[in-house]
Image (cartoon, rainbow, N blue to C red):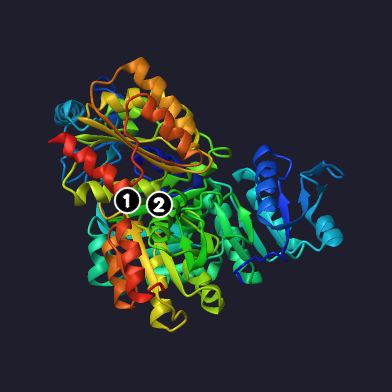
């Protein structure tokens, strides 16, 4: 789960990485209190998960309290779903570095990356001048060793006091990465200020959902989702994505779902919404169809090929869902796998024409949208 | 012939007394797998499907000579169970658990590499040689997918395996051995590491690779082809050309992958290395026809 910037900075602060003085607010009335912490001039940073906040106007600078008030109101009123704003001191930036820790699947080690040229253009730098990104792999059972810290600091071209601060910063970041089951711990930019301080000006932190049994605070809120519908579906345990197309897709398994997306695009169709019907959800056809119908599809397309998620159970559930919800849109199915013959009998009984081939089903669904 | 396991391989089931463990132990036995022991701590002396249960892997190995282990344990206990198997000398492990923490997977992967052990998974449906033996939970009774034949299958997607393999079987081909390496972000064994097994297997004439967007495993297969590590025909299908943008991992994800990871890039790398790449599952059969025609 991706954390918001303010949550990432809480983790940084807990582990001893300096962060700018600041406070999170949820409405404009709380601004005065936050300004007492941040001082002026300040930065107003919308707490949204999307990238490119600066370009989208979701980060604003203010020199006076009045300017801060006006801009805070504008951010809360924006259509980007801003629920929280981080009010921070404006930094005197001398240099911007990049520091990140992620997972190297090939070696099973943590991969540390750094660059003396941090900031928003770091991805372009990785393509145009990959030698400017320095890397160090670390065995997580061994922990990060002093020479590995030094390698990174020399690579970043640091010396003197900032070398020492950088060592401490990276060591702390590595501890947080391990302690929090992070998939990503990134400081960008890691700022060197005019008076020689090293401060994490912005950060991204993502915690592995699979570690939720030993990590706290992994509860997603409305702010994590683009729409009410996606949030409600997630609360009910259904992975759900909303788009603006025609086909309401109920599919089981990531690989098959991705294939169906490909085929829909190949044959000129569009997706209204996608719902994961596999895993523990295959017995929940009524709820699944309710969510799918709320995406206003022109047709519902159901594609599965399951082992444990039995075809006959899905078909039986589907029959119940149709009887209960009486959907007005046509339904195309390609429900295959364990007990597929029984499934076909059930589906024919309720007047559907069960298909056996994914491509045929996709084409049939697209034809019904025209 | 087969890869990874054959009818003689002595297989241990960790978590055998759970409902999934017991259910699939029966199916593995029915297919012909030599299941010799089960392990569930605290249940020593019990019997599941006629298989003796032990408290520890070490004890099971000493008494039965088990040499491979399939795990039906929950993801949070997978790390412990895998290290117990490795510590008892087992070097072939299949991990079905879906949801192993990434940090656990990193530790396991690093340890398996150091020991030269093959730990397959997590989040895999398993490994099968149709008609011979299986470790995992593959529905081998669906004969339009698991028909014995001469094509090796390597896949990272459970749901897509049935779809893509059925296309190949419909064209008249069959499966020599199938290896699901699992759908996790840190697979404990990678595609390219399985290729030498298919290369060495006289029962395998060609390989079907079922890939997905993300990561670099398909690119590594292309490198193995370029390096001559695998010289038999290879047909690939890679899903996710039009997948909605998934979870982007800060800037680090883009920097690590360095432009790799897209389906377009994977298909280009595989084609450049001499593989045939199907854009749609329905093309898989026809591509096999061009490299490995069926004698009619």
Circle 1 is placed at which residue position?
Answer: A259
> Mark 2 vs mark 1: same chain?
no
Q: Residue at x 63, y 56 (%)?
A: B135
Q: Secondary structure at mark 2?
A: helix
Image quarter where the N terminus of chain A lies is top left
Left or right of residue A59: residue A134: right
Q: Residue at x 29, y 57 (%)?
A: B280
Q: State yes or no: discs 2 and 1 in contact (Cβ < 8 Å).
A: yes
Q: Relative to B117, is B57 above or below? A: above
Visible in this render: residue B246?
no
Q: Residue furthest bottom?
A: B228
In depth, the one of A124 and A319 nearer the eye is: A319
Left or right of residue A336: residue B99: right
Residue A359 image offset from top left, x and y in percent:
28, 48
Chain label for disc 2: B
Q: Secondary structure at mark 1?
A: helix
Q: Which-is-in-front pick, marks 2 and 1?
A: 2
Image quarter where the C terminus of chain A lies is top left
- Dot 2: few (<14), some (14–19), or many (≥20) neighbours within 10 Å? many
Question: Cα distance, mark 2 to mark 1?
Answer: 10 Å
Q: Residue furthest front?
A: B296
Disc number placed over residue B163 in the picture, else none: 2
């Amino acid at each position: 789960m991706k954390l918001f910037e303010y949550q990432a900075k809480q983790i940084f602060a807990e582990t001893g990485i300096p962060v700018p003085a600041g406070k999170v607010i949820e409405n404009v009335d709380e601004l005065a209190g936050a300004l007492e912490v941040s001082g002026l001039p300040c930065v107003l940073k919308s707490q949204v998960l999307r990238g490119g906040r600066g370009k989208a106007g979701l980060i604003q600078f203010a020199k006076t309290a009045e300017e801060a008030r006006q801009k805070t109101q504008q951010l809360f009123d924006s259509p980007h779903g801003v629920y929280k704003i981080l009010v921070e001191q404006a930094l005197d930036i001398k240099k911007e570095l990049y520091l990140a820790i992620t997972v190297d699947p090939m070696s099973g080690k943590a991969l540390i990356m750094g660059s003396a040229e941090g900031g928003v253009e770091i991805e372009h730098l990785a393509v145009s001048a990959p030698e400017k990104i320095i890397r160090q792999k670390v065995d997580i059972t061994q922990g990060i060793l002093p020479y590995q810290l030094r390698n990174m600091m020399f690579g970043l071209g640091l010396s003197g006091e900032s070398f020492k601060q950088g060592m401490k910063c990276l060591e702390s970041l590595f501890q947080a990465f391990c302690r929090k089951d992070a998939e990503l711990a990134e400081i960008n930019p890691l700022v060197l200020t005019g008076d020689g301080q090293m401060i994490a000006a912005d950060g991204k932190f993502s915690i592995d959902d699979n570690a939720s049994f030993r990590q706290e605070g992994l509860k997603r809120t409305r702010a994590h989702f683009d729409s009410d519908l996606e949030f409600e579906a997630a609360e009910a345990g259904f992975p759900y994505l909303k788009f603006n197309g025609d086909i309401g897709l109920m599919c089981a398994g990531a690989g098959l779902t991705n294939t169906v997306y490909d085929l829909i695009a190949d044959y000129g169709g569009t997706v209204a919404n996608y719902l994961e019907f596999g895993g523990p959800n295959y017995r929940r056809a009524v709820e699944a169809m309710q969510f799918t119908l709320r995406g206003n599809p022109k047709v519902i397309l159901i594609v599965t090929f399951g082992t444990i998620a039995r075809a006959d159970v899905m078909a039986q559930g589907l029959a119940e869902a149709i009887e209960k919800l009486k959907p007005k849109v046509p339904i195309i199915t390609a429900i295959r796998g364990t007990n597929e013959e029984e499934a076909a009998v059930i589906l024919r009984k309720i007047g559907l024409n069960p298909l056996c081939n994914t491509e045929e089903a996709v084409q049939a669904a697209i034809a019904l949208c025209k | 012939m087969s890869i990874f396991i054959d009818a003689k391989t002595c297989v241990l089931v960790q978590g055998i007394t759970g409902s999934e463990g017991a259910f699939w132990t029966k199916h593995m036995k029915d297919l012909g797998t030599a299941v010799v022991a089960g392990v569930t701590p605290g249940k020593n002396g019990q019997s599941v499907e006629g298989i003796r249960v032990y408290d520890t892997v070490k004890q099971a190995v000493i008494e039965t000579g088990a040499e491979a282990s399939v795990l039906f344990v929950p993801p949070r206990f997978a790390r412990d169970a895998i290290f117990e198997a490795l510590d008892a000398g087992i070097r072939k492990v299949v991990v079905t658990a879906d949801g192993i923490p990434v940090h656990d997977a990193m530790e396991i992967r690093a340890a398996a590499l150091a020991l030269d052990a093959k730990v397959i998974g997590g989040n895999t449906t398993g490994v099968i040689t149709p008609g011979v033996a299986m470790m995992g939970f593959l529905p081998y009774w669906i004969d339009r997918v698991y028909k014995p034949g001469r094509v090796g299958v390597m896949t990272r997607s459970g749901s897509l395996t049935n779809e893509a393999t059925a296309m190949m079987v419909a064209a008249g081909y069959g499966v020599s051995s199938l290896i699901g390496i699992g759908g996790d972000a840190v697979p404990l064994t990678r595609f390219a590491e399985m290729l030498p097994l298919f290369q060495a297997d006289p029962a395998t004439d060609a390989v079907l690779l079922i890939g997905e967007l993300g990561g670099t495993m398909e690119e590594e297969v292309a490198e193995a082809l370029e390096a001559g590590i695998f010289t038999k025909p290879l047909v690939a299908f890679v899903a996710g050309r039009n997948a909605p943008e998934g979870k982007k991992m800060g800037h680090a994800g883009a920097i690590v992958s360095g432009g790799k990871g897209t389906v377009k890039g994977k298909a280009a790398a595989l084609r450049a290395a001499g593989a045939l790449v199907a854009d749609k599952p329905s093309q898989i059969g026809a591509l096999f026809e061009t490299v490995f025609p069926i004698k009619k």
